[in-house]
Amino acid sequence: MPIQCEYYALEGVQALVKNVHLIQRHLNPALQLGGVLLTMHDARTRLADQVVHEVREHFGDIVFRQIVPRNVRLSEAPSYGQPIVVYDPLSRGSIAYREVAKEVIRRHARPA
């Protein structure tokens, strides 16, 4: 579940979590959030850090360690019809998403 590091995103998360609980109760008791990804983080603002703190406190271990920064190259890539890893593989956003992918792989790796 991606969460932008902005105030109104926290309100939207509450609604989404409520919907997940409804689905668990009525349709799919096994449904679980696979992870929470903090996105569009602007390190220059205190608000972004407050959102990170609130999300980590509320969701705990399912929050990915990697945070995706606000990055112009990430915004540009779709307009060129390319994923960020092709459009600008060395941008901060591209590097962050590769790190998230590694976390996903580690979380779902099966012991041999």
Image (cartoon, rainbow, N blue to C red):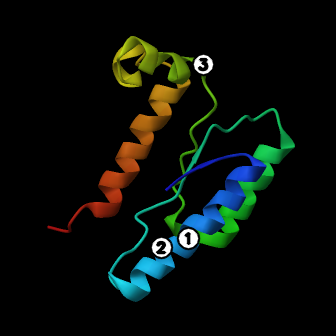
Image quarter for residue 48?
A: top right
- Picture residue at 62% right of the left edge, 61% below the top: 13
Q: Position of residue 17 (x, y in %)?
A: 56, 70
When the figure is inspected, residue 20 is found, relative to residue 76, above or below; the finding is below
Distance of label 1 from label 3 (alpha carbons) = 29 Å
Q: Amino acid at mark 1?
A: Val
Image coords of residue 27 (percent x, y): 33, 82
Asked whether the beta carbons under mark 1 and mark 3 sit within 8 Å of each other, the answer is no
Q: Is residue 86 above or below residue 23?
A: above
Label placed on residue 72:
3
Marked residue nearer the N-terminal end (1 or 3): 1
Q: Residue at x 73, y 63 (%)?
A: 54
84 relative to 55 in the view: left or right:
left
Q: In which quadrant will I find the C terminus?
A: bottom left
With respect to residue 41, does 23 lie above or below? below
Disc 2 and disc 3: Cα gap in Å? 32 Å
Q: Nearer the viewer, residue 2 or 27?
A: 27
Considering every residue shown, the one lying at the far right of the view is 46
Residue at (56% x, 38% y) in the render: 68
- Where residue 70 sits, quadrant-wise, is top right
Residue 71 figure quarter: top right
Q: Nearer the viewer, residue 71 or 22?
A: 22
Q: Nearer the viewer, mark 2 or mark 3?
A: 2
Of circles 1 and 3, the one toward us is 1
Q: Are marks 2 and 1 in contact (CB under 8 Å)?
A: yes
Residues 31 and 105: in front is 31
The kind of residue tagged 3 is: Val
Residue 97, percent from left and from top: 44, 36
Which residue sits at x=45%, y=27%? 94
Which numbered marker is on residue 17? 1
Assess disc 1: are there few (<14), some (14-19) or many (≥20) residues with their C-alpha within 10 Å of its C-alpha.
few
Circle 2 sits on which residue? 20
